Image: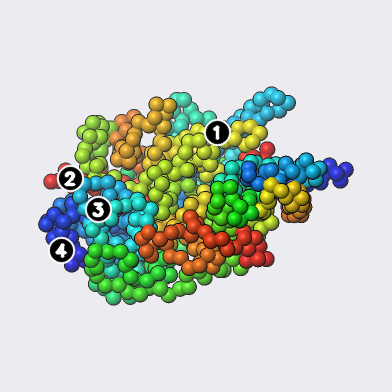
Amino acid sequence: MQELITRAKELLANGTVARVLGWKIGDMPYNPEPAFFETVESLDKFVYNGFCGANLSKYMIEASKLEGKTLVCLKPCDSYSFNQLLTEHRVDRDKAYIIGVGCKGKLDIERIKKTGIKGVIAIGGAEMTDACDTLAIDTIYGEKSCSYNDGMLERCHVCKGKEHKIYDELIGESRDTCDKERFAEVERIEAMSPAEKFEFFKAELSKCIRCNACRNVCPACSCRKCVFDSTKFDSAQKANVDSFEEKMFHIIRAFHVAGRCTDCGECSRVCPQGIPLHLFNRKFIKDINEIYGEYVAGAEAGSRAPLVSFTTEDAEPSIVNERGSK
Amino acid sequence: MYKIAKENLASLFALINETKELYLPVEVAGQTNFAAYTAEANVDLDTLKTVKSPKDVFFPQSENLYTCNKEDNKLKITPEKLVDAPFVVFGMKACDIKGIEVLDRVFLSDPVDSFYAARRANGIIVGLACHEPEESCFCKVFGVDCTEPAADVATWMIEGELYWKALTEKGEALTESVKALLTETCESKVEAEKSAVKAIVEKLPYSNLSLEGWNGNVLTEKFNDALWNELYKPCLACGTCTFVCPTCQCYDIKDYNTGNGVQRYRCWDSCMYSDFTMMAHGNNRNSQMQRFRQRFMHKLVYFPANNDGMYSCVGCGRCVDKCPASLNIVKVIKAFSEKGDK
Amino acid sequence: MSVNNEFKPKIVAFCCNWCSYAGADLAGSSRLSYPADVKIIRVPCSCRVNPMFILRAFEKGADGVIICGCHPGDCHYSTGNYYARRRMTMLFSMLDYIGVEKGRTRVEWVSAAEGVKFSETMNDFVAKIRDLGENVRLGDLRCKN
């Protein structure tokens, strides 16, 4: 982290960049917030550790409108999002100075708390220089510990790899965190009967409070005005009407980002109700891979997304009848 | 003072539910929220904070106001029936009960909101004292005593037993109706629990948060402060903080086209949204900074100005736990104090 | 008695102006019958069908939705139906994934000359939806009264 701060200060001082987009130290051990730093002194509050899960690429849409370059810290998975935004002309490459930061997997305080830990005061073992093996947690109710992997976000368990797809320079080490099969959960649902599938999604989506955090955090949801914000639209953005009305919102949202979603996992990270929203996006990714050929959104800037392209030999929609549930 | 063993709570709930609707914390797909009791419901009294506050028992996220239907070429308007049967809310925490007090100020002052008033008149609140407060709690700052829920009935969960004490007439009546399941006991254990929990509250990192400088008389000064321009930046403009909050009370009224008529309903609104207070002439808060500022100014300045100094934050800490960008009211208060120090 | 109680499905058919809508006309002028349960909505191209149209139809009480467009290669706008094909494949797969019965949605390519195919397709689709019964998984409760 020190190397990162030193370099950021240097670039800010010599005028290469006008501001730094990173994370500011929080008032709890686990709540750093995304922040713009405009002075060298303010960078003393810069932090980069296991709790810096926020994907900063979406903030670059606004930063691209500002005067001068913005230094942005991107984790390997964030670099896919940046590329995707670049493909869609939503960010300006010339306005960004990208430092690819290393990643040892990002932590989720909710997961740590799910292991029964309460009243967290301090957390040790989450710094980038640590081995990221075990977290030593000091709580009001005594000393606790939690394995790093148990506290990790779902997305890190199915990590796409620690290679940055776009950067100006790289700082920091990474650690391989992929220890689960990416499509296993999707396959588990696919194997259910229609009634079971319906019950599963109904239970999950009935929790939705329509706060729109999933949409607002999503780097693929970059429309200037969302269809769900339209006053002429009667699936009002705020109404949580019957227990499963939210399916409309979530299916359409997943559809709108299909073929563009880089599976960065921010939607699931931010959901206050812990809905596994990535299961929608990942289903589309899996279908696209299987029916139209492997495609990784954001792996390469400028690539053509599968749903805005076609071949004359594409499968007919009736293929769903053969592939889908029995 | 009465008590009942934890394993007998299921029969207590069933007994209450025989005559009254019962709402309590229920776990669905890994998350606990207040919901109507059923025999199959996975009741969860161990989770300190439900994701959503229980305010939606009294002020639902969306509720119908009336329905218009076409019948024989005539318009038929059916107003929604008001709640007229008593119901019980079990397990509300002291901060959430204080939240209801805040909502009362809004909905029960003139003009009275009849939907809310009907629910308040029929609702019987059974409060549950906190056993293990968490680091994000700061109810003490707003004068809430988490060991003494100001409800119709106050309860404490101590070593596998629920201690039960009626505090109001409504509470006495409820106690009478379930007396068969309760046994009489003394208060000594409860007193010990209260002082133990109070000692923990003292140790919480936010318990000494200072509200100095926040009151109803600093409107212009705070409103024009340049600090807002910095603070709002990470805000994603989602409505998480407002929807999990026990005191946020803004709502919107909309019409839904059912194909054969119109259903007029109201639903929670959020000051974080771009169409908040949208009027025919447009929107009077055009930027996210203004909308962000509105939330905190409302809680810490406008509300006290209009309600004898009462803040409309109760320190439940849900926004601290849930904000996707790790922004929250505590950080805002601290940022202003730090600025003052310089 | 039984006639009155028989389930009358509501079917929405999105038909492309340049082919299947004319196909429906041809079916009519050739006196080929198809059930009156089918309500046709004319669209300029199968590609115009936004996935939201389909969900909205179900939400407001449709029991089945069928999209008819020009045969691949024959699109009036050259390529519209190719895009529609991918989109609908994805959407149908998603609906299957959340537990909506597969038979409720269908895509058929029907040209302006295929009055017979239009009538047969509709008869078959309506029969399938009758078997599936009422759509309860995608409807909005508010539209039921």
Please indicate, yes or no, whether residue B189 appears anywhere in the rendered image: no
Query: Where is mark 1, residue-wise?
Result: B255
Left or right placement of residue B258 versus residue B251 in this view: right
Marker disc for residue A95: 3
Q: CA distance from mark 2 to mark 1?
A: 45 Å
Q: CA distance from mark 4 to mark 2?
A: 26 Å
Marker disc for residue A6: 4
Residue type pointed to by label 2: Lys
Q: Quadrant of residue C93?
A: bottom right
Say which of marks 4 and 3 sits in front: 3
Q: Determine the residue located farthest toward the right in the rendered image.
A: C1
Say which of marks 2 and 1 sits in front: 1
Q: What is the crowding at mark 4: few (fewer than 14 residues within 10 Å), some, or many (at least 20)?
A: some
Residue type pointed to by label 4: Thr
Look at the image and tell me in which quarter the C terminus of chain C lies: top right
The answer for which chain carries disc 1 is B
Query: Where is mark 2, residue-wise?
Result: B339
Query: Foreground residue, B59 or A222?
Result: A222
Q: Given contact means CB atoms under 8 Å apart, are the residues at marks 1 and 4 in contact?
A: no
Question: Which element carries disc 3, helix, strand or loop?
Answer: helix
